[in-house]
Amino acid sequence: MKARVQVMLKNGVLDPQGEAVRHALGSLGFDGVEGVRQGKLIELDLAETDAETARANVTAMCEKLLANTVIESYEIEIG
Amino acid sequence: MKAAVIVYPGSNCDRDLAVAFERAGAEVTMVWHKDTTLPAGLDIVGVPGGFSYGDYLRCGAIAAQSPITRALIDFVHAGGHAIGICNGFQVLTETGLLPGALMRNSGLKFICRSVGLRVATTDSVFTREYSDGQVIHLPVAHHDGNYVCDPETLKQLQGDDRIAFTYADNPNGSVADIAGVLSENRRVLGLMPHPERAVDEAHGGTDGAAVFRAIAGLVEPA
């Protein structure tokens, strides 16, 4: 079973890298980009076959390691 | 005084930190990240700067899960002292031993230069040799030193006098100019600037030596 974890900086936490990308897009002539947020995508290959158990396991992984919940939020996609 | 310095794969300030401790009169043991226990009778553990585990995932995130760090957490919970410098500060926030997190510098650049720091509290074993409000100069060398915490945590840090150092001229966007913070029991210090790189005239300054002199005066082992 596969799981995808998307880790993003929480809303309200300034994302300096996203801002730099936004400026770079502007200087390339891509007008109208009002905001850029940059995150991480983590793909996991799991032995687990039950989706609910997999989700619970991945949630624990996010809380313990994959995300720093002081500044980051995460979303989990199973399957 | 007995000190241990943790060495993770990618640490690069471990020997400098050991020398700074030794010069202050400490007996230093280096401990490897795979070790599961710290030496007996320790007064303090140093978590050095560098790029532990290549900064993979987030700076300090993997180191925070290593076997020796588990021993460090137990040591601190038992009342032990610890100092985390630069990457060591990042490791300590990732373990939750210190509040907040260190993000990419607001200017996105790696900053490597000497900065002015204000001693924000002298009420700790690390800062007691300075005077309140004293401005010292220490080198910084980091890409992710932008300290962030939620507004309640900041209020708590300010109210409890747990901000150890602030930048005189904020180089990285840290909230409230924070360069270093203390734990609730004031026995753990994390800071981005490098006091161990300012303990010898040949370093270009000796403003960091007072931190190690102060630590050497520790009389209450954990």
Image (cartoon, rainbow, N blue to C red):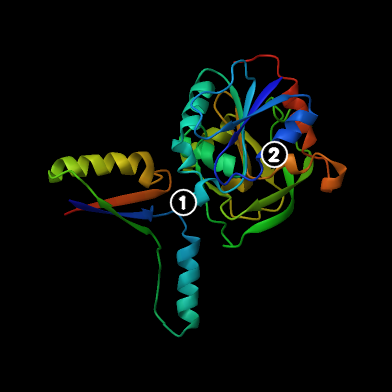
Residue B56 — which label?
A: 1
10 Å neighbourhood of mark 1: few (<14), some, or many (≥20)? few
Chain letter for mark 1: B
Residue B123: give x, y in percent of width and height.
69, 26
Q: Residue furthest left?
A: A50
Q: Residue furthest bottom?
A: A29
Mark 2: amino acid: Arg
> Picture quarter containing residue B20?
top right
The quadrant of the image that shows the C terminus of chain A is bottom left
Observer-nearest residue: A2 or B170? A2
> Picture quarter containing residue B211?
top right
Q: Name which residue lies at 56% across and 52% down.
A: B144
Dot 1 lies on which element? loop
Asked if residue B179 shows in the view, the reply is yes
Q: What residue is pinned by disc 2?
A: B15
| Relative to B220, A25 lies left or right | left
* For residue B119, above or below residue B28: below
Residue B88: give x, y in percent of width and height.
58, 40
Q: Earlier in the sequence, mark 1 or mark 2?
A: 2
